[in-house]
Amino acid sequence: MTLKIALIVFPGVQALDVTGPMDVFAEANVFLPPAERYQLEVLGLEAGLLACSNGLSIQAHRHFTEASTAYDLVLCAGGPALPDQDFGPAFYSWLRTLCRRSRRYGSICNGALMLARAGLLDGRRVTTHWGDVAALARLCPSAKLEADRLYVQDDNLFTSAGVTAGIDLSLYVLCQDHGPEIALSVAKRLVVFTQRSGGQSQFSPFLTATTPDDSPVAAVQRFVQANLRADLTIGELAQAANMSPRNFSRVFARDTGVTPAQFVEGARVDAARALLENPALALKTVAYECGFRDAHHLRSVFMRRLGVSPQQFRANFAVMA
């Protein structure tokens, strides 16, 4: 049975949010019998040519008001300006109805913001681009954000992290529809991994919690980042905040959403990521400079927090001479 997929686009859409998933499903059609192939439709919020954020112009197959009443999968693409774009109640009402009638729905990158404005993420497990996690949390406080995941499935809702993660999500959907062999064949054609190691934390610059600059907690955060080689016990941190250890732990967790120990570990990981981009530094040097016990401790924390080893991270992000 032919599976109908709709991608929703708008002026300023991220081109790869559209072309990445489309290429996955279009390539899949090469390996599928005619009766099982995907039928792809691009639905535009405006008629005519739409300018993508990179300057490329694309033309939707039809205006969203001319779309079918239901699809096997509806995906909202994202774009850099989407956090500030509001497409009006008529569009969100249409999107809400379409997604509820369709078998599956979801988003690529920060297209999740579009779903949030339509009231489609309440109480659901979701992810989005790491840079838009805070915006999504403000729009839909009840959404259960899994910020480090490349993609998340919650029943019939599918959301992906930033940009190229739309390819990961599409391969995941393809595997569900037609099995791992087809997904692997498409991944080989596109020269990508069927399942990437690690989450999107490895791609974000610094994910440690932040607070207002004039707060005692912010002073402690600055103290931590300036003294990573130190033990950084609760007592030391409380003294830097001029608080009792018990009160400090309570206030820090309340204002940042993480414990002091979690913040310290995250700050050390962030610093290590920056140093690992220099291929000349030995792992034991990186570990020492960032306050880890040794290179083995560094590796253990990287695997737990980022899903990749320091060596894998360096292979992906080291600055070549």
Image (spheres, rainbow, N blue to C red):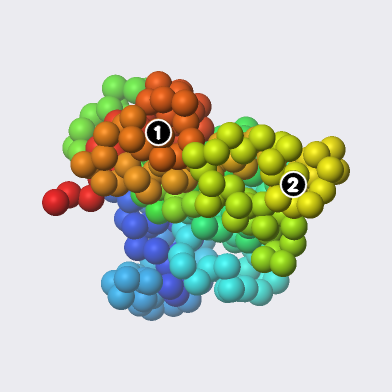
Q: Is residue 60 visible?
A: yes
What quarter of the picture does the N terminus occupy? top left
Query: Which residue has dot 2 on it?
Result: 239
| Numbered tag placed on residue 199 in the rendering | none
Q: Earlier in the sequence, mark 2 or mark 1?
A: 2
Q: Which corner quadrant of the image does residue 37 belong to? A: top left
Residue 87 as seen in the image, left or right of residue 61 = right
Residue drawn at (75%, 57%), measured in percent from left and top? 216
Residue 236 vertical placement versus 110 (above, below): above
Q: Secondary structure at mark 1?
A: helix
Residue 294: x and y in percent read 41, 25
Q: From the image, tell me which residue sits under label 1.
A: 287
In the figure, 125 relative to 17: above or below?
above
The picture places residue 174, in percent across and down from the top left corner, at 39, 33
Asked whether residue 97 is in view, the answer is no
| Residue type, mark 2 in image | Gln
